[in-house]
Amino acid sequence: MNERIIAICLLAGLAMGRSPRAATLEEIAGGELPSADPVALVSLFIEADADGLQTSGEHWPLVQRFAIWQDAPGWDTVTVVTAARLLGARIEGDAASVRVRYGVLGIMYEGEHGNPILEALPASTQEIQYTLERQDGAWKIVAPQDGPRVSVDHALAVRYAKYCGTHDCEREPAIQTLRQANQSGPFRVEPLPAHP
């Protein structure tokens, strides 16, 4: 899917009252990435990561389309994020960096019996600097490779849907926190501020 089609889909979604979301993992897998623009690439990576890109080994070929990483580590712990804001970008030759501030709900992992544990962090935001390199005309993320950042919706609808089908999630504090946070609206990536 090229950048123009993605933009048209986003505008159509706004006109229909939907939240502006990038393509789903399936759409990204079947389309082109905005590899000529490091900021657009990072923005799409953030959306894909929030949708579970790094939570399954079967997505490793798609991760490699975004990044230059040597391996696909197993992640038992995820950071649950509520939003992301692009703060700034710097491009110098074949190197680039994009700073991002995430809204963070907490760190989530499974307890002894598969029950979800959600630990709050001291700060409700986290700043990450993505470093990119251009190789053969295409930008790729080099660092950091530091674990999935999934949306509240992904944590509820995918990660713990099966658990809640067999357990009383009304008694699970982590699930209740996720449900409450999910009422604030869907995950979104705020673009770089426009410069006059």
Image (spheres, helix red, strand yellow):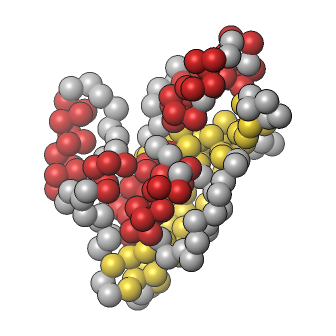
Left or right: where does residue 111 sit relative to residue 59? right
Image position, residue 152 (x, y; %):
56, 33
- Name the residue: 26% across, 25% down: 17
Front residue of 14/171: it is 171
Left or right: where does residue 37 sit relative to residue 111? left
Front residue of 109/136: it is 109
Image position, residue 59 (x, y; %):
45, 56
- Residue 179 lies in quadrant: top right
Where is 40 relative to 168, above or below? below
Left or right: where does residue 56 sit relative to residue 191? right
Image position, residue 24 (x, y; %):
34, 45
Q: Is residue 92 visible?
A: yes
Left or right: where does residue 117 sit relative to residue 190? right
- The C terminus - image quarter: bottom left
- Name the residue: 59% across, 52% down: 148
Where is 125 relative to 114, above or below? below
Q: Is residue 89 visible?
A: no
- Name the residue: 23% across, 34% down: 13
Image position, residue 65 (x, y; %):
39, 68
How many callouts does the rendering have? Answer: 0
- Residue 109 lies in quadrant: top right
Where is 98 relative to 18, above or below? below
- The N terminus - image quarter: bottom left
- Name the residue: 52% across, 20% down: 183
